[in-house]
């Protein structure tokens, strides 16, 4: 049996695939919450704390350095290393939580690295807990507003509650899946990863609208037209994924690395949710309205 025939016969069952993926993502997020009290790790901008950037031009073992600085500081310190296109280290970023004083972090870094920290070779910024909480609250409001606005647009376009619900659910599952992937890969919530999550809410409806338009404009052969949309969608996915991968592996700036990484994770999640969950729900609606012969 060809794939199209298999899909025609089993599209309702295939909806279970993204549903299981969604539940796994929720389980990963819940496990993270149980272990740390947060649904996702946050950088100093969102949780408060201190970030010290040191200009450096020698190779470092990131994990070993992280352990040594944390030991000398008497608390957890995360370390990220930026490199140039040739793989040479250019700077090291040390991040400590809100409970550690900036002077204590500076002393630990200076002692571990064996250098004197000056304005020429380092910089430091601190974010208070209240400010971090304010940033996080603003980010949450923006995400909620984005969900509401995209769902409203979908409803205004199609005027079909079932279809609008399918598009909203797909966007929600994309974001949850991306956050689950962030937790598995140890990616923090920062300005870059937040921007990527917001892109999914709006950007993920492109393929969904394409599918719905193709499906609702026909009374027969709906799956055939959905597969025409699939060909277009795969071209869009491949183009986006390669662009994100290029940014991920060619950039050396940590915030851009996180931005591109989350986009790559989300693109894969969106591909599965769009063509199995959203398409399946739209076809289910068409079958109930027009009859099985319409498929």
Image (cartoon, rainbow, N blue to C red):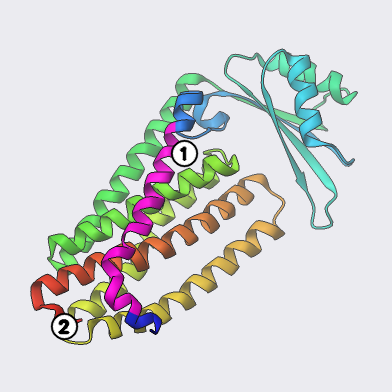
Q: Where is residue 155 drawn, in percent x and y?
A: 17, 61
Image quarter (top left, top right, bottom left or bottom right) of the N terminus: bottom left
Per the image, the residue denoted by label 2 is 294
Residue 149 magenta: no
Image quarter (top left, top right, bottom left or bottom right) of the C terminus: bottom left
Label 1 or label 2, whichever comes before in sequence order: 1
**Could you say which is closer to the camera, residue 188 or residue 152?**
188
Q: Secondary structure at mark 1?
A: helix
Q: Where is residue 266 drawn, in percent x and y?
A: 48, 56
Per the image, the residue denoted by label 1 is 28
Up/down of 9 relative to 63, above or below: below
Q: Is residue 145 left or right of residue 291?
A: right
Residue located at (48% from left, 78% from top): 235
Q: Which residues are magenta?
A: 6-30
Q: In the rendered structure, find residue 184 and report the number of the disc placed on it.
A: none
Quadrant for residue 117, please give it: top right
Q: Where is residue 44 drawn, in percent x and y?
A: 57, 29
Residue located at (63% from left, 50% from top): 257
Q: Where is residue 139 drawn, in percent x and y?
A: 40, 38
**Secondary structure character of the magenta stretch overall:** helix
């Amino acid at each position: 049996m060809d794939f199209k025939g298999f899909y025609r016969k089993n599209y309702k069952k295939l909806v279970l695939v993204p549903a299981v993926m969604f539940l796994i993502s929720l389980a990963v997020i819940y496990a993270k919450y149980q272990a740390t009290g947060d649904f996702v790790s946050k950088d100093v901008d969102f949780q408060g704390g201190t970030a010290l950037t040191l200009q450096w031009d020698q190779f470092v073992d990131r994990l070993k350095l992280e352990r040594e600085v944390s030991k000398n500081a008497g608390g957890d310190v995360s370390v990220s290393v930026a490199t140039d296109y040739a793989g040479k280290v250019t700077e090291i970023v040390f991040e400590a939580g809100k409970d550690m004083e900036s002077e204590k972090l500076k002393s630990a870094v200076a002692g571990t690295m064996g250098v004197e920290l000056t304005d020429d070779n380092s910089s430091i910024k601190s974010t208070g807990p209240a400010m971090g909480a304010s940033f996080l609250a603003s980010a949450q409001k923006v995400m909620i507003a984005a969900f509401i606005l995209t769902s409203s647009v979908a409803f205004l376009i199609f005027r079909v509650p079932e279809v609008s619900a399918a598009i909203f659910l797909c966007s929600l599952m994309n974001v949850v899946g991306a956050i689950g992937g962030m937790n598995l890969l140890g990616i923090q919530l920062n300005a870059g990863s937040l921007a990527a999550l917001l892109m999914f809410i709006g950007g993920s409806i492109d393929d969904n609208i394409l599918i719905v338009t193709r499906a609702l404009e026909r009374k027969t052969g709906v799956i055939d037209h959905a597969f025409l949309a699939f060909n277009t969608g795969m071209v869009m996915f491949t183009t986006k994924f390669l662009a994100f991968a290029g940014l991920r592996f060619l950039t050396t700036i940590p915030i851009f690395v996180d931005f591109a990484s989350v986009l790559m994770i989300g693109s894969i999640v969106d591909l599965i949710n769009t063509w199995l969950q959203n398409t399946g729900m739209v076809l289910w609606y068409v079958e109930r309205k027009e009859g099985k012969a319409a498929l």
